[in-house]
Each structure stands twice: as C-alpha cells, then as structure tokens.
Image: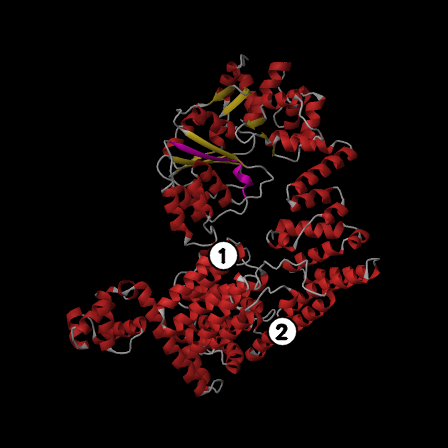
Amino acid sequence: MICAASKKDYYFSERIRRRMERIPSHRLTVVEAPSGFGKTTAVREYLSALSDGARVVWRTIGEENRLGEWEVLCRVVGEADPQCGNELGALAVPWDDECLPRMEAALAAMRHDGEVYLVVDNYQFVRSRIPERYLRAFYGALPEGVHLILVTQLVNPVPRAIVVDAQVNHIRREHLDFDTADIAAYYGQLGLRLTGEQAEGIRRLTGGWAAGVYLTALAYSEAGTLQAANDVGALIRATVWNKLSGADRLFLLRLCNFGSFDLETARFLNETDWIDENILDMLERNGFVWHDMGERRYYVHSILQLYVKKEFDACSGAFRERVLRLTAQWHEKQGDNFLALRYYALIGDFRAALSLPLATSDFSSNASAENRKLLLSVLDRCPPEIRAEFPRAMIVFAFALFIYNETERVVALAREVERNVAASAMSDEEKRRLTGEIVFLTAFLAHNDFAAMAAGYKRAVELMGGPTSIIDMKGPWTFGAPSILYMFYRSAAECDVQILEKNLPYYLAAARGHGAGADVVMRGELQFNRGDFEVAEITAHRAAYAAREAQQLNVELCAHFLLAQIALAIGDAAEYRSAVGALREKARASKSAVHLNMLGLCEGFLGAECDVGKVPGWLAEGDVASRVRFMTRPYANVVYAKSLLDAKKYARLAGIGAELEKAAAFYPNAMARIYTGLHVAAAHEALGAAEEAERALRGALDIALPDGVILPLAQNFGALSPILKRLLVRGFLNAAALKRISALAKSWSQNLQRVRASLLGAAALLSEREREVAGLVGRGLTNGEIARQMHVSVATVKSFLARAFRKTGVASRAELAAWLLRWEN
C-alpha cells in the first residue's frame, strides 16, 4: 500500500511494490479497491519512476461523465495514436459483433515508440459497459509494449471473468492494506515513534485503510492523539477542513457537485473573474486534490468531496439554492440540458427547468431508467400553474412519456395541455398551432392502427397550418424495427397495406417527409411473404430509391433488408451480398444505436430464420429489453425464439411461449404472431406434445392462410410438416394450401442452399463424408458400390446423398456431381 503525509512523502509496502512491478509484463492491469486506499497515487508514483522512454496517457473520469466505456477506451487510445483512435471510434461497438476483428486489427497496428501506459482512473464512472468479450478482445489485441491500466472502485466493478484471467494483473484491497508492520514503518518515515501495541491499535482502528492511516498520522503529529478511523468525518474535519481558510472552504463548497473542474468552471461557480492565488496554492498543497496540468483540471478525491457535500448540506438554504442554481446554469451553458434539468429540479425552479431548450431527441437519444425517473419527478412536483405557462415544453415531455410507454400519463398530460392552451391569453393562431401539435402527438397513441393514427395527422396539419415544429423528425420511423409489415399488419394484410398506402401522405405532410417510402416497403414485404418474389424485388428497389431520395435511412434499411431476403428466395448470391453490404455500410455509417440494433435484428433474422450468418449474441441470449424499444420487442422475440429452436432448447421455448404470444398480440403484430405460433408449435412437437403443437400452429394458420402469408411456413416446413399433415387429416387445412406451402418450401430450400453454397463453398457447406459421397457419385459409382467402398450401409449412403441434395439445392446425382466439380475447380 501507499500513503502520504504530503504530496512528496509516500510509503510503499512490499506487497504493492511486487504487484506494481508486474504492470510492464501485462497488457491489462486492474487496480480495484474502495475509495481511500491510495489506488491512484500508487499507480501514478510507480509510472513516474519508470524510464524516460515510457509514455503515460492518463485520463481521469469524473462523476459527471456521460461517456460510455467504449468512447473512453477510444479516447485514451486516441491520445497515444490519433489515427488508431479514429479507426476505433468509427466502429459500431458494441452493437455489431463483426467489429471485433476490425477492432483487433486496428489495435494490432497501433503506432507507438517504446512502452506506452494507457491509464483510465475512476473507471467506475464509465457508462454503458461494453460486453465482456469486447473488453477481453480489446486488451488482448494491444500490441507488445502497450499496457492498459484501469483504476476503479468496487461500486461498478470490472467483470469477474476479466480480473480472474491469468493474463490480467489484478491489484486488490489486500495488496493496498496497511498491516501493523507497514504502519510502524510509515510512522517511522514521518519521524513518529510507535510501540508495537500502538501500531496494532491503529491497524484495528483503521482496518488497514490507507486514508485512515494517513489522517490518523496527521492528527497524531499535530495533536498527539489517535482518533478512530471509522469516524472519517472527524478525521477530515480535524486534519483538513479545519486547516482551511474561510475563502478556501467557500471555494470548495461552491464546487462540491463537481468531481473535477477547470478554472473556468471555478470562476463561474464562485461568481468571480479571477481565483485568488492563495486558493490555487491550497489546491496544489492539498493531499486530496490532484492537479492534471496537461488537462488544466483539478480532481477532488471522493473522500474530501463527500465531506464537503455534508458541510454543504448544513449551509443555509439561501446559499445552497444559489450554488445549485449556478450549477444548473453552468450545465445549461455547456449544453447538457439533462444535468441542468436535474439541478433546477433540486431547487424547485420549474420555470427555469421548463425554459430549457429540451427537444424530443434529448429524451429519445438518452432513454434510460435514470432519465425516466427525472422526467416523472419533474412532472409530479411541478405546480400545475407553472406547467400551464409552458405548453410547448409539456408537449415535448408528453412525447418522452410515450417513449417510456407511459400511455395513461401521455393522455392525461395532453388533455391538461389542451385545457391550458384553450384558457390562455395567447393568440388564436398560436392556440391552433399548439392544439395541432397535441393532436399530432396523441395520434401516436393509436399505434399500430394507422387509419386511426392518420386521422390525427390529418387534423394536426389542418390546425398547425403546416408541419410540426416540436417533434424531432430525424429519429427512426419504425422505432428500430426492420420491417414495416411487422409494424402495421394487424389482422388483414391486404387491407392493412392499403390503409398505409392511403393514409401515409397525411403523416408525411405533418412530418416533413419523415417515413417516405414506408408504404412501398410494406407492399413489397407482403408480396414477398406470399411468394411473389419477382414482383416483390421490383417493389423493394422502388422503395429503397424513394427512401434514399427522401433521406429516410430507417426506411431505406428496411428496403435493403427486404432485398436481402428476396435474394435468398431466388438464389441470387451476388444480390444478397450487395443488399447485406448496403445494409451494414449504411447502418454502421450512421453510428446510431437504434440503427445498429436494427442491423442486429436484420442479421439475427437472417442467421436464425434463414440460416445465413450468425445471430448476434445479445439476441441469442434474449437480451431484448436493453437493446430495443417496447414496440419492437416482439420482432426481437421472433429471432430469440428461432434461436432457441435451432439450439434444441425446446422446453425453454415451450415454457415462455405464452409470454411471447402475449407480447406479439399486444398491438397486435400479425407477423410476430405467425412466427411465434409456428416456433412454439415446433418446440411442442419436438417434446412430443402433439395437441399443444397443433393448437399453436392452428393459431398461426388462422392468421396466415386467409392472407396468403405462407413463406414463414415454408421457411420452417421441415419442423412443421408432421403437424401440417395431421391438421390436413383433421380438416383444419386443405390439400391445396399444403401443396402450395410444400412447393414454396422446396423452392426456398433449394435457392437458399444455392446462396449458402456460393457464400460458404463446398468445404463449409458439406461435411467431409457428404463430400466423399458426392465425389464418388461424380466418378459414376452406384449407391451399393459407394457403400462397399466407404464400409457403410446403402441406407447411410442414401442419407448422405439426401443431405447433400438439400444443402446444395440440387435435384439429381448428375447435378450434385457438376456442383462439386465447379467448387473443386
């Protein structure tokens, strides 16, 4: 452990010396202990003693940090190598698993001269942690000579699987603790003599806590008495706070809500144009404040900051209100409206809070439990008469409530705004305008009945006299869903498509073209799911063009996703590569979490439902709620359910089937209901529960067959065929429908395997034994001859051939031989 009586006087135990000496031999070092154990000082002093050739990049994270873990890592690398930092920053981490090899390649090529140490201090304050496998890949890919050091508290620990990795240098509390011998040696270094009994007493009082040992040493040297370290406040008060001048204390009190600050912040909060030299000297001398001269920023130790906050709480109400107001005004000046909102709410200044230039994008791009709580708190505590003064702000808040699925509160707040607008003294024109904004907002509550929604949009335009000015139209029109048909197909597919085609213009007029092309995508999706692939392809290209011309990326991604699926259906590998390439390129270029999660849904569907590619880990694990908005969860559930089916986790799928069906029926989403029904049916069938399987599949057929939506059945025909045949016998399915499903299933399977073969090649597509059989077929051998040569039965040969036919999409022995010859040559 390390401890200091002043900034120049430190003590290192042998334990911490040995652990620190391991830093240069590890790519990752994690220093993890509670506040006050000297973590930062230990690392800083160790690195400062290294040879002049070593470079240290140090980034300290403050409590007010709004950066995610990935952004922090990119920035610390960027300070060492800007090009590498930029390359990492351009990656869609952690939303896209395919970024892993690109991340590793960028880090492996990182330029550096000599040893480089990348330090992230106060790592507990990073937000939105990346998946464990990304962090593992990150430090594993660092080039030789580059070392990452994470200094953190246990309130937000580094994943245990990381710190127990043998390749990671993990420095823990027990390495930083003071034992009796350390205490005696440290006091001796300070010129203070202790008996063994006194040293043991200090150890018991402090528990080996470095800050406690430090503070008791200060108290002992000044007063000749030992104070209990469990009374941290008393120690800080006696050894630090009481030694400060009144001006020093006032300075720190005004900045108590900042874990770090620069002089501009300090001047603003202290309402002065200059900072007294005595205060700057105090900051330099104080053992609980660190001055990063490179960043020109002061960092306050959490122990001192917590104590100052307690002193602040004991100050007069007028002083506290003034400081909190200044804190809010500072964040407002910096453009951080959420932090400004929080501090204005703390002092109950709701006029100032509602005067902030908050936009719907502030809520949609920062959706979190924390911000939901802030939103509800402001609405609950703000007096009605003040809410009445800010109708535009209340409409923005109402849209935020919609994002958080607070439907009842949206309705109540919208009605309140309507009453307040009607009773206000504003002009009739402004009243109509705001009433139109309310009508536009409440139209969303009719989701996903687009006819009802459109009636609201039409009326909104009439009242507003033009498009809305409050709702941010840059957001994703589908709320992150990759399918328009999924969103608005409720019960009668053709009717629902016509409703969107007829009524979308009302929304486009109200929203300045937001969502252009969505009706064309939905038409193409219906054609596709009915098996009309040629017509669907024409429609999909038209949709992609319309969306691109209107700069509607969200809708354009839906169109490219549809083109990728069509390419599979017609066996066009080149078109599939083109569509998926465009989908990935555009989603990644947007760097939007919504679009990147949307890409994950597309790739998940292609991987699970179409057997092309891999399902992203978060989807396969059912991590839906943290990634997609509530309107889109049933679509994510479809991918999750098929992943369970492919993994043969039949009991789990059957067990959650009712919940999945309930979620799909909420709006309702007919496509989700169809897929969920057939997936659950397949799970029950695999478990031998025939009756439950038939019941689930009948529910899906009741929706799909009247609308001709048979592709989902064809895609899963292998698992559903026994159930379909039983339903045919029992009269729940006619022979013509089964014949059409079977024919489409055969076509789908053959063309899908043709694309897979083109993408993967023979070696990846066929097993070793299947390739051997195909090769012997090409040499003209009969099944019997092949069986004798391979020392298997004829039945086994036939089984190998059947699987090879299915995987390659061929229909005869001659075609199989020709297919293999093409790949081998």
Which comes before the other along the chain, label 1 or label 2?
2
Asked which secondary structure carries label 2, the reply is helix
Disc number for residue 75: none
Q: Give residue 531's position: percent from left, percent from top.
A: 44, 78
**Left or right: 631, with 271 as reference point:** left
| Residue 29 is at least partly visible in this image | no
Q: Is residue 181 above or below residue 618?
A: above
Range shown magenta: 115-126
Badge 2, how many Cα within 10 Å: few under 14, some, many 20+? some
Circle 2 residue: 503
Q: Is residue 121 magenta?
A: yes
The residue to which callout 1 is attached is 596
Residue 506 vs 132, above or below: the answer is below
Q: Nearer the viewer, residue 429 or 332?
A: 429
Q: Quadrant of residue 434?
A: bottom right
Q: Residue at x 51, y 17 (%)?
A: 184
Q: Position of residue 417 (x, y in %)?
A: 77, 59
Residue that appears at 47% across and 52% down: 92
- The image quarter containing residue 227 is top right
